Amino acid sequence: MTTTTTPQEVLESIKEKNIKWVDLQFMDIPGYIQHITIPSYTLKEGDFTDGIGKLDGSSIKGFKSIFESDMRMFPDPNTSAILPWTDNTPHRTLRLICDLYDAFGGPRFTRDPRYIAQRAEEAVKKAGFDVSYWGPELEFFVFDSVKMLPSFSTARDAWSGTGYEIESKEAPWSQKSGINHPIRFKEGYYPAPPQDTLQEYRSEVAGQLYDYFGIVIDAHHHEVATAGQCEIDMKYDTLTKMADNVLTYKNVVKNVAYNMKMIATFMPKPIFGDNASGMHIHQSLWKDRNGSLRNTFYDPDDEYAEISQTCRYYIGGLMEHSRALCAITSPTTNSYKRLVPGYEAPVYIAWSKRNRSASVRVPVYEKGKEAPKRIEFRPPDTSCNTYFAFAALTAAGLDGIKRKTDPGDPCDENIYHITPERRKQMGIKECPGSLPEALSELESDRKFLEPIFPKDAIDVWIELKSEESRQNSIRPTPYEFYQYFDI
């Protein structure tokens, strides 16, 4: 766990702990962790204020053209932490998450996801609040092995998907059958070991997150799907800090799996016929009143769910912009294999207390308590860039508050069982059915993002994601072979 908060303290820690390397990390636009590692003896106090000129922006998707590629990285001393998998090695490494700037004394890079998250926090304050709290629930799969066929070395273009094999000792199809009780499809929620083969793995991930990064864990458990679906829940935190925590979380999840000779994925829907991995996002807005932070979403006099009018307007903003938000919170073609009825996925745009078939839910575990009052936006999945996702949800919610958007009546019944005709009468819309549809919604409904997202960031997002979708649409898939090969 790190307590360093100033550049000088970081440098002192490097000497005291015999740290050999410094890993400078940032997130690119699609949401991948990028890094460059420098010798610890080259890091100077001035690097925190003047930046480190080590980034070629033209080599990062969506960043810079080749004729303007030079960029600077400004390490944030509050993010310093030893990478646990290097701790007991001769190559002990300190991690620092960086803010990105244009070169030659230029300003903040407008497409830096962390910058956009910080702009969202500024927007919260401009709207009259002091802080927002965020609690994403990340789900993911841990497999024994995954093989993509044919291999990259024999057919480069075919890497994009002519076939794949998933091996998991928990799965009904496992080639390791006979050594354990398999977990049936959709029956993986809360089984005890030995069926839950990943108890030790999740405990190791949770331990590293807390011991090395100070990330408090609420709980961990096996999720609904077979073949190693997991959930490890973090305690809520402020917006940029939580987005940093998600970056760290994904890095730890993957590295612990690798070191235990397994492989982790945040791909939403790797297995057809079973539940996918989502990332329900809990959020609330707080305001300082007489020196004490108070939850503006809480109203003890509200009979329905103890929520304030501010909270209702925030929900209204999320619902009004839900279809556009999906282009950012469910940003892959694979995301829309999750957002289908029948797998607990929130495909219907409605709100309710308790009701998990609605896209916006107000948890009501406890009555008469201010602190836990929040709303949960359920469509997102773990393939999203959380800096962008949190910022976009903030923009939608604040827009709802500003325009006093009425969310309408709550829906307190299983929406999956409501007929299409009655859903239409009730005004319940659906999330987009594909990435192109979601991008089209974003293109036509992007104005609400403009107080937080620079125009070029939205433009590049739509461009990158449209090309991803196009590349997927022109390639044959394994199921197409099954369906059409004998035609």
Image: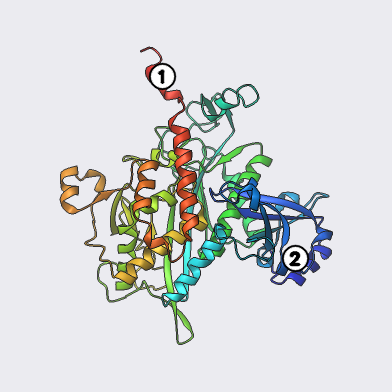
Residue extending farthest front: 67
Disc 1, SS: helix
- Residue identified by numbered label 2: 47
Q: Is residue 107 above or below residue 383?
A: below
Which residue is depicted at the point 36% across and 61% down? Answer: 363
Task: Residue 18: tell me if it is visible.
Answer: no
- Residue identified by numbered label 1: 482
Type of the residue with mark 1? Tyr
Quadrant of residue 147 in the image? Answer: top right
Q: Quadrant of the C terminus?
A: top left
Which residue is depicted at the point 54% across and 66% down? Answer: 118
Nearer to us in this view, 141 or 149: 149
Q: Is residue 372 above or below residue 84?
A: below
Which residue is depicted at the point 56% across and 63% down? Answer: 115
Alpha-carbon span between mark 2 and mark 1: 56 Å
Residue 85 location (% of width, % of height): 72, 49
Residue 447 location (% of width, % of height): 37, 61
